[in-house]
Image: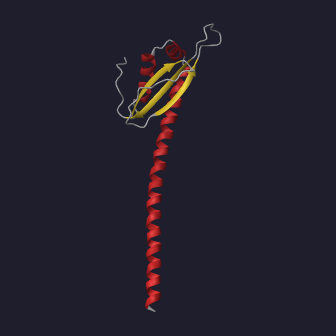
Amino acid sequence: MIKNKKAVIRIIEAIIAVLILLGVVLALISRQSVKADVSGNIYKIEHQILNEVSANNALRTAVLTSDNKTVECFIQSRLEKFSLDFNISVCNPWEFCLCNAPINKEIFTDDAIISTNITEWNFNPKKIVFCAWSGKLTDRNCV
């Protein structure tokens, strides 16, 4: 009878150990899913801002003429309510744009191709790359 009690106790100990491990794994998984939700929201914000840039003729012209200050001021006005900092880079569509971003942060990037209107003769599209990361928004001296 004592041998049976020892076996039952070992089985119960094994079950408790498995339950503890499952609890730890579930806790880790739930933390990762919250982080994924934040990144999804940041990508939505970036995509919405780039859509606004591509739909606004003045901002499109600023991108095409490499007037980054105008575009940065517009983006800064959109990001003021979020705890995000950003940088943009404008280059030719076939080039790789470098975004000056901190190396110790999680960087979220999105890009868009901006071109002239169909009625214009000078077709010289540009790619704008928008990099964002969590942090205090840098003041860009926009008026």
Asked if 19 appears above or below 58 in the picture, the reply is below
Q: Position of residue 86 (x, y in %)?
A: 42, 28
Q: Position of residue 113 (x, y in %)?
A: 57, 22
The one of 121 and 59 positioned closer to us in this rendering: 121
Q: Residue at x 50, y 27 (%)?
A: 49
The one of 129 and 50 positioned closer to us in this rendering: 129
Q: Position of residue 80 (x, y in %)?
A: 39, 29
**Residue lying furthest right:** 118
Quadrant that contains the C terminus: top left
Q: Position of residue 140 (x, y in %)?
A: 36, 21
Number of callouts: 0
Q: Quadrant of residue 9?
A: bottom left
Asked if 104 appears above or below 120 in the picture, the reply is below
**Residue lying furthest bottom:** 1
Colouring method of the image: secondary structure
**Residue lying furthest front:** 3
Q: Residue at x 48, y 27 (%)?
A: 130
**Residue lying furthest top:** 121
The one of 44 and 22 positioned closer to us in this rendering: 22
Q: Residue at x 45, y 21 (%)?
A: 74
